């Protein structure tokens, strides 16, 4: 039996009903979830989102940035896994140990670092499999890089922290093949910024990060560290399926999901043919992309991005 969520078009409420369909076996799918020992979350700095609509078009909102664009250092937003080096081991943003081969971190400094584990654009799912494995695959880890963007314990403003970071990594570059400082650049106007964003996204990148030159490293979200994408991201839980039509008859055509605010809607795009044959199991948390909201508060143009295997993926 498969549970399908159906909207009541008159009352705008949602009902869940059980129906027999050829998709019934899908409800029994099991998604492998990887757990870690409980640990206190790290007090790391987090970015706020910069609305792309406010810095493009004919009605640019000059107040959307607290400072002139030239006062920010900008880097590509990598689609990786956040990792904190505490001088002894790599840990996730949830405070869980990342099991890496000894040689991967053998020449890392004793100084704390904040960055992302990354392979290349479009390789997030492969990276997740590698990083979440408690028994590290030696060969697989050779494709992973630790891309560092900050020195979290330094009291200096970001521009000086970044200079120190470059010097630190440069000093050990001959001994290490896996540690890199993310390149930071500056631009003089918003047009160049949005052109850069277009180039990154058109080449399967995520977006850009903007950090004010004078920003201090602080725990929690700060408006001096911004992320810029061409879309918005959110999460929801799979609660049902809708059968496909045409070439997808007998397969998943869309998943019904429920958000943390109890909104239910369906997502039918973004899936590969293989994912339609074996879709995310009911109860699985997925990430999706969208562009704004409808008048009813439903994400507009929602499309599947990926399964979230753990709080750190």
Image (cartoon, grey):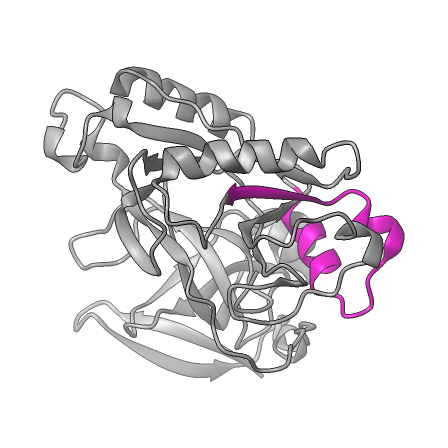
| Closer-to-camera residue (15/30) | 30
Q: Which residues are magenta?
A: 123-149
Task: Using the rendered view, name the quadrant where residue 66 is placed.
Answer: top left
The location of residue 261, given as percent across then percent down, is 28, 72
User: Disc count in the image?
Assistant: 0
Q: Residue furthest right?
A: 139
Vertical order, 84 against 41 (above or below): above
Residue 127 on the magenta span: yes
* Residue 260 appears left or right of 97: left
| Closer-to-camera residue (209/198) | 209
Q: Residue at x 32, y 33 (%)?
A: 213
Q: Residue at x 75, y 57 (%)?
A: 130
| Closer-to-camera residue (11/20) | 11
The location of residue 105, given as percent across then percent down, is 75, 52
Q: Residue at x 48, y 29 (%)?
A: 201
Can the viewer see residue 61 in this picture? no
* Residue 290 appears left or right of 142: left
The location of residue 196, given as percent across then percent down, is 41, 21
* Residue 86 appears left or right of 189: right
The location of residue 151, given as percent across then percent down, is 49, 47
Can the viewer see residue 122 in this picture? yes
| Closer-to-camera residue (85/132) | 85
Q: Residue at x 65, y 69 (%)?
A: 97
Q: In which quadrant of the rendered image does the N terminus lie? A: bottom right
Vertical order, 229 against 194 (above or below): below
Vertical order, 23 against 305 (above or below): below
Residue 234 on the magenta span: no
Q: In which quadrant of the rendered image does the C terminus lie? A: bottom right
């Amino acid at each position: 039996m498969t549970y399908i969520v159906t909207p009541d078009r008159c009352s705008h409420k949602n009902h869940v009903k059980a129906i027999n369909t050829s998709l019934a076996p899908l409800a029994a799918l099991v998604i492998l979830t990887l757990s870690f020992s409980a640990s206190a979350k790290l007090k790391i700095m987090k970015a706020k989102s910069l609305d792309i609509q406010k810095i493009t078009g004919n009605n640019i909102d000059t107040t959307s940035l607290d400072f002139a664009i030239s006062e920010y250092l900008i880097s590509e937003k990598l689609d990786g896994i956040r990792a904190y080096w505490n001088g002894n081991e790599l840990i996730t943003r949830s405070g869980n140990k990342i099991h890496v081969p000894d040689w991967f971190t053998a020449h890392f400094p004793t100084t704390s670092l904040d960055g992302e584990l990354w392979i290349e654009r479009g390789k997030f799912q492969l990276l997740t499999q590698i990083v979440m494995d408690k028994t590290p695959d030696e060969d697989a880890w050779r494709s992973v890089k630790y891309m560092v963007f900050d020195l979290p314990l330094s009291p200096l403003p970001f521009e000086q922290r970044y200079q120190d970071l470059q010097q630190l990594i440069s000093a050990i570059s001959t001994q290490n093949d896996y540690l890199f400082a993310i390149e930071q650049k500056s631009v003089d106007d918003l047009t160049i910024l949005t052109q850069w964003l277009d180039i990154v996204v058109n080449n399967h990148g995520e977006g850009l990060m903007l950090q004010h030159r004078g920003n201090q490293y602080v725990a929690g979200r700060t408006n001096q560290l911004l992320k810029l994408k061409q879309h918005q991201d959110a999460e929801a839980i799979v609660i049902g399926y809708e059968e496909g039509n045409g070439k997808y008859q007998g397969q998943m055509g869309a998943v019904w999901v429920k958000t943390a605010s109890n909104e239910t809607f369906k997502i039918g795009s973004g899936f590969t043919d293989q994912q339609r044959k074996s879709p995310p199991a009911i109860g699985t948390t997925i990430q999706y992309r969208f562009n704004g909201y409808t008048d009813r508060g439903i994400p507009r143009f929602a499309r599947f991005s990926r399964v979230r295997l753990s709080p750190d993926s």
